[in-house]
Amino acid sequence: MTTPPASVIAASVIVVSRHRAAALIRCIVALTQQDHPHFEVIVVADPEAIRQVEGLGLPLKCVKFDEANISAARNAGLAMAAAPVVAFIDDDAVAEPTWLTRLTAPFANADVTASTGFIRGRNGISYQWQACEVDQFGQDHPLIITEPTLRPATPQRAVKTQGTNCAFRRDAVLAIGGFDHGYRFYLDEADVNLRLPGVTAIIPDAQVHHGYLASPRRAANRVPLSLHDIAASTAIFLRRHAPDADMAAALKALSLRESARIAEHRRAGRINATAEMALLSSLTQGWAEGLARPLSALAVLVTTAPPLHPLNTGPRPGKVLSGRFWQRRRLLAKAAANRDQITTVFLFSPTARPHKLSFQTDGYWLQTGGIFGRSNRDASRFRWASFRQRIAEETARLAGYRPVS
């Protein structure tokens, strides 16, 4: 094993998954393209997913875990982490090749105990999440951040790290008891953010793409299937961080917020009145459970992790393949065969179709759309450009996040 440069901060990347093996494999394949030269991947997933992941033949640490409790799953991953920094990414997300190097770099500063980056949404281009702080009532406060920024945390307000794009100093997280198992889903990272002392780094260029796949709590079209865990976690969060809060008023505010979200789905025809009533009932039941769940003291986590098991990655050159949509088969076959480079394929049609960028399990990035279509949702729906000009523009945009030449 090659010794990494002294400036490189070793990392353990933890991926939690449950019954979504195909997405998990895509996430892992993308991690093999990281330019970070010294990190391990820890997969915490159900037995069938672990079986399929082991078929990849990669040097992974695998933990079989099949409970609907993301906090407990993350702690199971922490117990296996050997590196001084632990990073988290969701199974329905993929990381840009520069993600981990940028996300871990701030930990060279001894005051930094956490870091987080930006997240691109379903089309792989527009932002789903950028930066905000969370307060002791669980409310978000958006931040306008355009460059790496350090912000101190307090028990009343801290940078909110998203679970699909965050990292922590391992010893600091263990010292506060890790993730609270009371948060089976929702507000689990926000709870850690308020309990974790130190400084959090916001790194805009440490980027992942997140797709929101279907789960027991949410359909593929993002319609909620249950509000139980959201309500339960909210009640626990307030009891933990704002014990003097007016709980009746908090329940009313949560109900109004979720009712407004459900109403949007009703107007779009994605949900009917029966399902709406069931969702509101699950919210009430979850709130009651959150009030009744015992708030246990969180003891220091003591773990003895196996030695770091590096994935053996590192910087590699990039390559761009481009063509019209009728050249798709030839170009994609060429991209799939090119495993020694970070390959990005542009397939454009002479239309104004909007663009979509995604990572393929075969190991390449694919951007499709019209020559005259928009990439970012905030842009004009139509703009005149030549094929060559559009390829140059899109290549330049991506150059900030991955090698393209």
Image (cartoon, grey):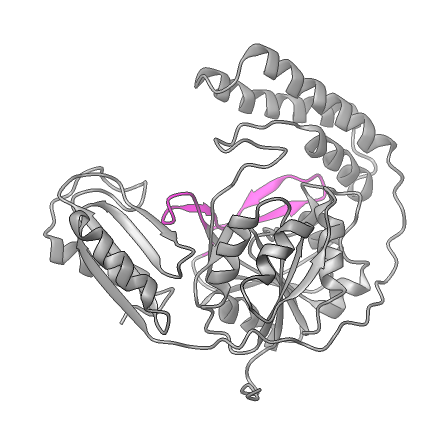
Quarter of the view holding residue 136: top right
Q: Residue at x 71, y 34 (%)?
A: 229
Q: Residue furthest top?
A: 273
Q: Let me know if residue 142 is in the magenta part.
A: yes
Which quadrant of the rendered structure holds the N terminus? bottom right
Query: Looking at the image, which residue is at 70% across and 65% down?
Result: 198
Q: Name which quarter of the figure residue 372 lies in.
A: top left
Residue 400 position, x and y percent, is 35, 65
Using the image, determine if residue 186 lies above or below residue 194: above
What residue span does the magenta drawing correspond to?
Answer: 120-145
Determine if the magenta segment contains residue 23: no
Locate the C terminus by quadrant.
bottom left
Residue 385 at x, y = what percent? Answer: 12, 49
Is residue 311 at all visible to an observer of this figure? Answer: yes
Q: Is residue 181 left or right of residue 355?
A: right
Which residue: 75% across, 74% down? 306
Q: In the rendered image of this protein, does residue 12 appear above or below residue 90?
A: below
Number of numbered discs:
0
Residue closer to the observer: 380 or 283: 283
Residue 61: x and y in percent read 66, 66
Whether residue 16 is visible here, answered yes or no, is no
Q: Observer-nearest residue: 237 or 363?
A: 363
Instruction: Describe residue 86's horizontal placement relative to residue 79 as left or right.
Output: left
Residue 239 percent across, percent down from the top left? 82, 38
- Judge from the rendering whether residue 372 lies leftward or rightward of residue 118; answer left or right: left
Residue name at image x 53 percent, y 66 percent? 103
Q: Is residue 121 above or below residue 282?
A: below
